[in-house]
Image (cartoon, helix red, strand yellow):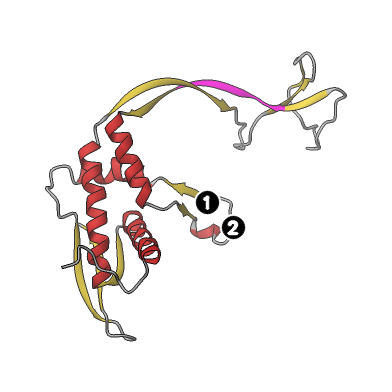
Amino acid sequence: MAKYRKLGRTSSQRRALLKNQVTALINNGRIITTEARAKEVRKIAEGLIALAVKEKDNYETVKVTAKVARKDKDGKRVKQIVDKDTKKVLSETHRDKDGKILKIENGVTVTVYDEVEKEIKKDLPSRLHARRQMLKVLLPVTSVPGEAAGRKKGTQKVDLVAKLFDEYAPKYADRKGGYTRIIKIGQRKGDAAMEVVLELV
């Protein structure tokens, strides 16, 4: 008996299909697919969640100083004009009263940065390995707000690995497997394949 279903596809197509469906399941919490595909996706998804549960507390918090751009009241970066050679501040702003960009001889526009101390989670070696194993399977996802559909403004990259560690791992910490369920919803109209809902419990 074969260890996995071929799903009527070549190996590269099958790998792409499974990656897409696992990514959609982790991102949305449920997908509608055929029964054969759902059983293959379930194996991979449950493996990822089990890995996240195992490594959820395997990190140390570290304080780091980071340079962060200073923002004004509108949320835009604060810029000033400095001398090219001496780095002396020539003007606190790079625009005049009318909002036009200032031109000062021998001046360069630079963004003002502040140093901020942050606490970050530093992965220990086994958690880092688990993170890389997850990134092998999960594809990059970009969330688009409803009002900005079709535009790049407001889009954000979704960190699915962080979602696995921070959201799903604590939720399933006291559960010994069985993180997904398959619910049959009937045969598909075109080819009579059994359609199912695959969802996280």
Residue wearing tag 1: 155
Residue 25 placement (x, y as % from top left):
31, 59
Identify the residue at horizontal 13%, vertical 47% (top origin). Answer: 175
Q: Judge the density around disc 2: few (<14), some (14-19), many (≥20) Cα neighbours within 10 Å.
A: few
Horizontal side of residue 100 vs 69, given as left or right:
right
Comparing 70 with 193, the one in front is 193
Q: In this picture, which residue range is highlighted in magenta?
A: 110-117
Image marks 1 and 2: residues in contact by CB distance under 8 Å: yes
Q: Which structural element holds mark 2? A: loop
Residue 88 occupies quadrant: top right
Residue wearing tag 2: 151
Residue 169 placement (x, y as % from top left):
24, 43
Horizontal side of residue 8 vs 148, given as left or right:
left
Q: Kindly identify the amino acid type of the residue bearing the numbered disc 1.
A: Thr
Q: Which numbered dot is residue 83?
A: none
Q: Kindly identify the amino acid type of the residue bearing the numbered disc 2.
A: Arg
Q: Decide whether the magenta segment is chiefly helix, strand or loop.
A: strand
Identify the residue at horizontal 38%, vertical 27% (top origin). Answer: 120
> How many angstroms separate mark 1 from mark 2 (CA)?
8 Å
Residue 42 placement (x, y as % from top left):
23, 60
